[in-house]
Image (cartoon, rainbow, N blue to C red):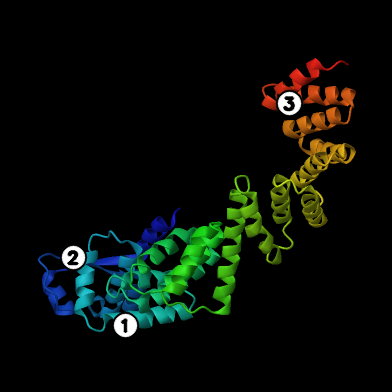
């Protein structure tokens, strides 16, 4: 069951009493052209009848609470526009419902508090109301991720209020948790630019998401501009010093610049953190092959191949054996590569090369 359906189902606890136009005017001081159904919590009605034994003496506050609740639970409810008219016409309705909400929060009835606040937004679309509803819906989302879309909907509406920073902070948190640090950075910057207080927590948050964005950008441009990528990636060591992938990408950048010794240094740093990273082991083999140390390259590549059975690593092995003059092992590993992917372009090139060589 999705959250919207869950909210609508909560209306089954409401009792809808038909009130004619005469009584609507008498009770709520409004003029309507038709009778309408006004909601009240059925449990409250039962309790009221038990104590007073008189259905005619249901407190008006019960109806006020019911109308706010219905507007919050179902935005498309048939009589919502009537309820808005009634509640806007009663000067004390908002103060009354704020007291009800405060009591429900105190009793940890957070979902009911949220629905009442959502209803209140129809009457008071203010920063004060959003301050409260954002805190409650964020708490609910952290307890149950199915409220995520509900919170995002509230935040997007709140962001339409001019110079209102708070929703951008919570939006940034959600985007970071979702894994979209680029969006998280946008929202935390928006929070600050709109006057949000840049506390130590906010500064740390901003720095953490910016670092991830820089890491991703560095990786993205690595192939086309390794020098620029390294200028982005290397400073991140102070932040991601225990992240083996960072050292791996730095090493790839140095290999692309033909600085194999530095590449090997950073690969060793990566292996000291995680000795099982196959891509690092494979990269070690490539770098040692690049400096002509085929024996060491083969040792690394064989280890990587045993773990992955990758045609790419297998063809790297074939080339290392060829360069070291070990034709038998070159042919043996070529046959393995051919079985793995006979249509691989490197496999086809190696087949032509081997055909030209005498056994």
Identify the element where label 3 is drawn: helix
Residue located beneath label 2 in the image:
36
The nearer-to-camera label among 2 and 1 is 1
User: Considering depth in this image, is 95 or 233 the residue closer to the camera?
Assistant: 233
Name the spot of residue 255 as percent of width and height, x first: 73, 46
The nearer-to-camera label among 3 and 2 is 3
Name the spot of residue 152 as percent of width and height, x first: 43, 62
Compared across the picture, whether 294 is left or right of 48 comes to: right
Residue located beneath label 3 in the image:
340
Question: Are discs 2 and 1 less than 8 Å apart at CB?
Answer: no
Name which quarter of the figure residue 57 lies in.
Answer: bottom left
Disc on res. 24:
none
Does 248 sit above or below residue 170? above
The span from disc 1 to disc 3 (Cα, nearest Å) is 73 Å
Q: Earlier in the sequence, mark 2 or mark 1?
A: 2
Residue located beneath label 1 in the image:
96
User: Considering depth in this image, is 70 or 258 the residue closer to the camera?
Assistant: 258
């Amino acid at each position: 069951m999705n959250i919207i359906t869950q909210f609508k189902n909560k209306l089954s606890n409401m009792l809808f009493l038909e009130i004619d136009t005469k009584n609507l005017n008498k009770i709520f001081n409004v003029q309507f052209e038709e009778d309408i159904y006004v909601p009240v919590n059925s449990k409250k009605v039962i309790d009221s009848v038990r104590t007073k034994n008189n259905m005619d003496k249901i407190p008006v506050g019960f109806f006020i609470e019911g109308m706010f609740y219905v507007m919050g639970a179902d935005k498309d409810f048939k009589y919502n526009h009537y309820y808005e008219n009634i509640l806007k016409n009663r000067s004390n309705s908002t103060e009354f419902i704020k007291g009800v909400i405060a009591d429900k929060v105190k009793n940890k009835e957070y979902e009911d508090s949220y629905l009442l606040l959502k209803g209140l937004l129809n009457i008071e679309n203010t920063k004060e109301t959003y301050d409260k509803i954002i805190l409650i819906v964020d708490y609910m989302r952290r307890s149950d991720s199915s409220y995520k879309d509900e919170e995002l909907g509230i935040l997007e509406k709140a962001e339409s209020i001019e110079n209102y920073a708070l929703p951008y902070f919570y939006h940034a948190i959600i985007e970071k948790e979702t894994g979209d640090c680029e969006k998280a950075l946008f929202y935390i910057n928006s929070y600050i630019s709109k006057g949000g207080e840049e506390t130590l927590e906010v500064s740390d948050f901003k720095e953490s998401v910016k670092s991830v964005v820089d890491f991703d950008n560095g990786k993205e441009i690595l192939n086309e501009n390794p020098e620029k990528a390294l200028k982005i990636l290397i400073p991140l060591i102070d932040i991601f010093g225990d992240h083996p992938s960072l050292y791996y990408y730095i090493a790839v950048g140095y290999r692309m610049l033909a600085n194999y010794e530095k590449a090997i240094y950073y690969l060793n740093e990566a292996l000291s953190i995680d000795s099982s990273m196959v891509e690092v082991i494979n990269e070690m083999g490539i770098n040692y092959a690049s400096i002509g140390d085929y024996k060491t390259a083969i040792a690394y590549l064989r280890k990587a191949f045993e773990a992955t059975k990758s045609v790419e690593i297998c063809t790297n092995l074939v080339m290392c054996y060829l360069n070291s003059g070990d034709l038998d092992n070159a042919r043996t590993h070529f046959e393995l590569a051919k079985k793995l992917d006979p249509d691989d372009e490197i496999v086809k090139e190696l087949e032509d090369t081997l055909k030209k060589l005498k056994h």
